[in-house]
Image (cartoon, rainbow, N blue to C red):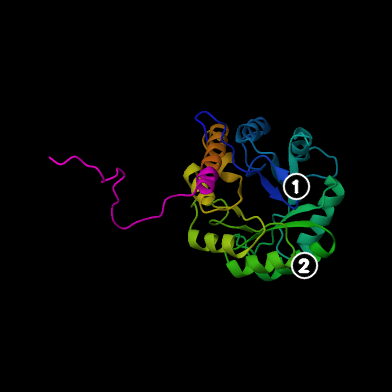
Amino acid sequence: MEWGQNINMSNLIIAGKEFKSRLIVGTSRYPDPHTMMQSLEASGTDFVTVSIRRLNLSGVEGQESILNMIDRKKYSILPNTAGCFTAKEAVLTAQLAREALETNWVKLEVIGDDETLFPDVTELLKAAEQLLAEGFIVLPYCNDDPITCRKLADMGCAAVMPLGAPIGSGMGIRNPYNIQIIRDLVSIPVIVDAGVGTASDAALAMELGVDGILMNTAIAGAQHPVNMAKAMKLAIEAGRLAYESGRIPKRLYAKASSPVEGIINT
């Protein structure tokens, strides 16, 4: 590679659809809609997620205005089933999203309880099976459990989205070893969802070999959301490029960086 040559990382591909950015960004909890739009622009994303249960789909004033603000030619919309506690609720929400937004893509969330917001795996698997049978492109939010992820992949999900830490916790990647195992175990894209708090968390996740990251609170809840969005963009690009470049092996002992052959004796 010649000096000055452009260096590009590969693009994210899910279910045959190509995305220029490996960052998926949420649309809630921003101080105001203008900040949200600036943050989306700064992040470089072309894939945004919206909570269907928190949208007003009746045409009355409310958060529906967010959808009106988002340029559907610039951003792909990923409706999610946040706030659902049963497979039945999640399936109904996904069906409403398909009708309202004219998309069969869905980020599937089925939560076990209000306090931890951990997925209910039994209900998640049940919902995923039904939605796949109905022709949905399913991206399930799940625990960082390799076996659950393998089951979801074997069912036909388009990607798996294991948590890095509890939603909104900002604790970073709590179990990087499981994330690596998941990456090795499934052949579909792995998107870390939840737990990222700052740019170093995003870079670490990408260096583990995941295909992308979905985040909301880390950007929307920052003191300066637009700046944090830019930081996340750069961190994800750096982490992915480092992964694709192939890091040096870790060693317990030192290894001289300069060759010892030909050293002048003194």
Find the residue positioned furthest to the front: 262
Residue drawn at x 59%, y 37% is 8
Mark 1 crowd level (few <14, some 14–19, many ≥20, 10 Å Cα): few
Q: Amino acid at mark 2?
A: Glu
Identify the residue position indicated by label 1 in the image: 17
Q: Is residue 263 left or right of residue 266?
A: right
Secondary structure under badge 2?
A: helix
Which percent across, then down, holds residue 130? 80, 66
Q: Which mark is residue 179?
A: none
The magenta region covers 239-266
- Vertical placement of residue 121 versus 95, above or below: below
Q: Which mark is residue 129?
A: 2
Looking at marks 1 and 2 on the same chain, the residue that comes earlier in the sequence is marked by 1
Residue drawn at x 79%, y 61% is 91
Magenta includes 174? no
- Quadrant occupied by the C terminus: top left
Secondary structure under badge 1?
A: strand
- Vertical placement of residue 245 versus 124, above or below: above
Magenta includes 250? yes
* In the foreground, 194 or 58: 194
| Contact? badges 1 and 2 (CB < 8 Å) | no
Report if residue 116 is visible in the image: no
Q: Is residue 249 left or right of residue 256?
A: right
Q: Give the quarter of the image for residue 160.
A: bottom right
Which percent across, then down, holds residue 234? 54, 37
* In the foreground, 213 or 243: 243
